[in-house]
Image (cartoon, helix red, strand yellow):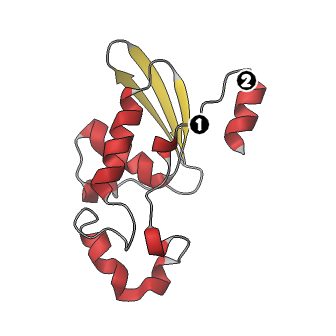
Amino acid sequence: MAGEEIAQDSGLALTIDPRWRELNFGAWEGCDPHELGGAIAPFWDDPQANPPPGGESWGNMQGRIAQALLAIEEDALVITHAGPMRAALGLLLGLNYRQTWAFHLPYAARISLRLWGDGAQVTELIA
């Protein structure tokens, strides 16, 4: 696991926060989107109103990502998936769902963000 290796190499503590997990795709978990055919179109059009069967809505994921962002109190490296990265960008930049897809986040994408709250902090999100 990359997080364990990074923590060990840097001598820093590893904290696993389940709020940073990927969107729960329910019955679609592990499926190739192309194999789902037209069933996935409503989800892509409006993931809040049309979550995957037995899965999580975009708003629920955004809620937990908002909580995870608020919990960051010092410099942090967050290793997560593209969905939570998009949710974080949407929340922090005031973007809607469609606008978050304007960002190309290939495998192993890296985003550096500087957040200000009670103090300055830097968070790096790695897909």
Q: Is residue 77 above or below residue 28?
A: above
20 vs 102, left or right, is: right
- Position of residue 120 measured from the top left corner of the image (x, y, whole percent): 39, 15
25 vs 96, left or right, is: right
**Residue visible at 35% across and 84% down in the picture:** 39
**Residue visible at 38% across and 53% down in the picture:** 103
Query: SS for tag 1?
Result: loop
Residue behind mark 1: 16
Q: Is residue 65 above or below residue 121?
A: below
- Label 2: how many residues lie within 10 Å, few (<14), some (14-19) or many (20+)? few
- Position of residue 48 measured from the top left corner of the image (x, y, whole percent): 25, 62
Q: Quadrant of the N terminus?
A: top right
- Position of residue 76 measured from the top left corner of the image (x, y, whole percent): 53, 26
49 vs 68, left or right, is: left
- Evaluate if marks 2 and 1 touch, with contact meaning CB atoms under 8 Å apart: no
* Lower position in the chain sequence, tag 2 or tag 1: 2
Residue 14 position by quadrant: top right
**Residue visible at 47% across and 74% down in the picture:** 28
Query: SS for tag 2?
Result: helix
- Label 1: how many residues lie within 10 Å, few (<14), some (14-19) or many (20+)? few
Residue behind mark 2: 10
**Residue visible at 31% across and 57% down in the picture:** 58
